[in-house]
Amino acid sequence: MTKAIRESNIQTLCQSMAISNIDEDIVLIEQSCTAPQLEVPRRMNFILLGLCTEGNVSYHLDTQKQKISAGDFIIVSDHHVVDELQTSHDSKGLYIALSKDFYHETIRNVSDISTLFLYARNNPVLALSEQEQKTFKDYFNVLQKKISDPNNHYRRDLARTLLLAMFYELSNVIYNYRLPSSGRRHMRSDAIFTDFIALLEVHCRNERRVGWYAEQLNITPKYLSECIKTVSHRTPNDWIDFYVIQELRIALKETTKTIKVIAQELHFPNQSFLGKYFKEHVGMSPKEYRNSK
């Protein structure tokens, strides 16, 4: 029997839980008991933000084990795969799920926020101070009140405005994590980096050429490389390899597909080429990695 990765979307979330939501675009979850167990890995089709207020939660994100405790804040972006979710008996938390459209609609034209949130894609757990925890709880409670009022004609606009304000607060936390000693800002480069990563997350399975991404962004490969290096201190090829290896890790650990099939699905010339590529970046063969703990 093949182990398959299923899509997880907000619609399914709303159907399985009694939660506050607006048009299945923004969903607020006040978790006060153990979360439902995942029978199979789930690829996120929405953005999840959350604060663990009591107990702890463990899970695998793109095959990497994560654990959060009281005071930890998580950001799980779309396209990432979650598996082996486990919660302690006393686990409690406040979570906000956003559809991709609503998220991008909220942060459009705000490059500072979108760039800083990209940092969180690879650093999904942040430890918040007591004041930062209180700030998130305050926003959550106000959002819940506004969303729960169906007679408020402007509740969607209010929710979007409150979320944007909350994002600025969270971005300040991320900024302090990411750039403690740098005050330099590169607005154009930030925007290009954001667009590059968005394209990469969608197309990394079948496009690994820097030139292709530059073409989609209507810039030269050289300029793309300069911008990505300025913002992230990594080259476009480094990011491409990172996302391809991430997809390979997921396929090897979370499915029972043969290496030959995985090579075909990720558009490698053949199984041997995939094996050499994977070993070069991971230090072991795909078969060794699949059998490792």
Image (spheres, rainbow, N blue to C red):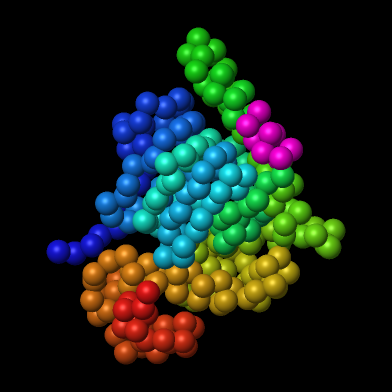
Position of residue 222 measured from the top left corner of the image (x, y, whole percent): 66, 76
Q: Is residue 51 above or below residue 201?
A: above
Residue most toward the left?
1
Whether residue 198 appears in magenta in the rendering, the answer is no
Asked if residue 185 can be seen in this view, the reply is yes
Residue shown at 40%/50% (left/top)? 86
Magenta residues: mostly which secondary structure? Answer: helix
Relative depth, front residue between 19 and 203? 19
* Residue reaching furthest to the front: 89
Comparing 125 with 238, the one in front is: 125
Relative to 283, residue 220 above or below: above
Q: Residue, x 33% and y 69% (percent of image)?
A: 253
> What residue appears at the point 56 percent right and 77 percent down from the top-left corner?
237
In the image, taking residue 223 as reference, residue 253 lies left or right, namely left
Q: Can residue 268 be seen in this snapshot? A: no
Say if the magenta span includes residue 132: yes
* Picture quarter with the N terminus: bottom left
Q: Position of residue 281 (x, y in %)?
A: 49, 83
Q: Position of residue 118 (x, y in %)?
A: 61, 56
Whole-percent x and y of residue 116? 67, 53
> Is 75 situated left or right of 173 in this image?
left
Q: Nearer the viewer, residue 101 or 61?
A: 61
The span shown in magenta is 130-138
